Amino acid sequence: MNYFDYEYRVRYSDTDKMAVSYYANYFLWFEAARTEYFRALGLPYTDCEKEGIYLPVVEAQAKYHSSSTYDDLLVVRTSVSLLRRSSMRFEYRVFPKGDEAKLIATGFTVHVFVNDSMRPISVPPRVRENVKTFVLLA
């Protein structure tokens, strides 16, 4: 799978005093999209955790291009742009559903695969086999 589209409707509680989506919420939406990306691949995080495999975030960034407001239906397009021995980088592109040209935010997170002792481990073969690296163009 080159990318996964996660839909999210902005809730009233997602907005700030200026009636726009609070900036930190984008990281929550990135996480939800990333989780659903793995689930769509047949690799839910819960299965990884049962096997003692975890994916902590070691780097995160977001860039805001325009705003979203209460009740907007957004798409968080998620892809993997880099797959290394023990890490992977996810790219995110947020836009209103039906209008890919109107970019709201872009971002990325980098994750390291670790065991129960928080020591880096190799990317599991089933992840490597199912994930296709794909760069989202901004």
Image (spheres, rainbow, N blue to C red):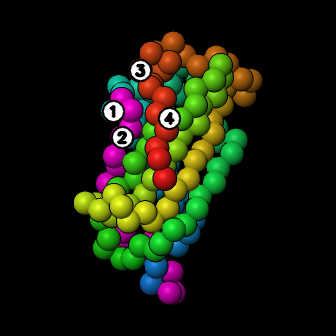
Write down the quadrant of residue 57 in the picture: top right
Cα separation between marks 1 and 2: 8 Å
Q: Which residue is mark 3?
A: 130
Is residue 8 placed above or below 50 in the rendered structure?
below
95 to the left or right of 49? left
Q: Residues within 10 Å of mark 4 (few under 14, many from 20)?
A: many
Q: Report if residue 5 lies within the magenta region.
A: yes
Q: Which residue is mark 1?
A: 40
129 to the left or right of 109? left
Cα separation between marks 4 and 1: 14 Å
Q: Earlier in the sequence, mark 2 or mark 3?
A: 2
Q: Residue at x 39, y 76 (%)?
A: 69
Q: Earlier in the sequence, mark 1 or mark 2?
A: 2
Cα separation between marks 2 and 3: 13 Å
Identified by mark 4, the residue type is Val
Residue 110, how many percent across, how many down?
A: 63, 39
Q: Residues within 10 Å of mark 1 (few under 14, many from 20)?
A: few
Q: Residues within 10 Å of mark 2 (few under 14, many from 20)?
A: many
Identified by mark 1, the residue type is Ala
| Extreme-top residue of the structure | 125
Q: Earlier in the sequence, mark 4 or mark 1?
A: 1
Do callouts 1 and 2 mark residues in contact (Cβ within 8 Å)?
yes
Looking at the picture, tell me which residue is in the foreground, 100 or 51.
100
Q: Residue at x 32, y 71 (%)?
A: 72
Look at the image and tell me whether residue 113 can be seen. no
Cα separation between marks 4 and 2: 10 Å
Q: Which residue is mark 2?
A: 4
Tell me which segment is drawn in magenta.
1-18
